[in-house]
Image: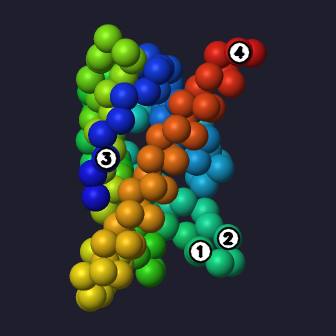
Amino acid sequence: MKLIRTLKIDSDDFYNFLEKQLIEEYKESTGKTITADNIVKGLRFKKVGDKQFGSADVLVTYYKRGTNYAVTIRSASDTIQISYTTSKDPKGLTIEFEQIIQSFENKKQNRFFRMFSEGVYLGRMSDTLYDIQKAIDKNNEQ
């Protein structure tokens, strides 16, 4: 599913946020430290999970700071593809957020239930973007 929103943040803050998240996950999972310069297509690591979710393989499938970030996460139970494509806008940063959860895409549902599920799914995606904006705003206040 794809969602486009314009947030009142700037490109540097958005990509700093994404990089910081990935760097922290990498260190937590591998015990090794990387920098933003190490975030390139092909970066891969096994993300440490908990008892409920297990571990997952994380692969950066594309990264160009200021333009696009894409990652694929594969676990024993699902594959999730996430991508952010950004462009500057007079009102802030326009973000095209695409998220494909394989198990959701494969479900066979009646039309009404499918529409309802997609509405919930899009709402969660929108919440994710606004949560990123809130985290960036909070960080900028400090």
Going by the picture, which residue comes out furthest to the top?
90
Is label 3 in a helix, a strand or a loop? strand
Q: Pointers 2 and 1 in contact (CB under 8 A)? A: yes
| Residue 64 image-quadrant placement | top left
Q: Position of residue 23 (x, y in %)?
A: 55, 38
Residue 33, numbered label: none
Residue 53, numbered label: 1
Residue 101 as seen in the image, left or right of residue 14: left
Q: Position of residue 108 (x, y in %)?
A: 26, 88
| Mark toward the viewer: 2 or 3 | 3
Q: Which residue is mark 2?
A: 50
| Mark toward the viewer: 1 or 4 | 4
Q: Amino acid type of disc 2?
A: Asp
Of pointers 4 and 3, the one earlier in the residue sequence: 3
| Residue 1 image-quadrant placement | bottom left
> Quick one: label 2, few (<14), some, or many (20+) residues within 10 Å?
few
Of pointers 1 and 3, the one earlier in the residue sequence: 3
Is label 2 in a helix, a strand or a loop? loop
| Mark toward the viewer: 2 or 4 | 4
Front position in the image: 118 or 87:
118
Is label 1 in a helix, a strand or a loop? loop
Of pointers 2 and 3, the one earlier in the residue sequence: 3
Residue 141, numbered label: 4
Of pointers 1 and 4, the one earlier in the residue sequence: 1
Q: Position of residue 55 (x, y in %)?
A: 55, 70
Q: Which residue is mark 3?
A: 3
> In percent of the image, x 32 and y 11: which residue is there?
90
Q: Amino acid type of disc 1?
A: Phe
In the rendered image, is residue 71 in sight? yes
| Mark toward the viewer: 1 or 3 | 3
> In percent of the image, x 36 and y 28: which residue is there?
6
Per the model, the C-alpha gap separating discs 1 and 3 is 26 Å
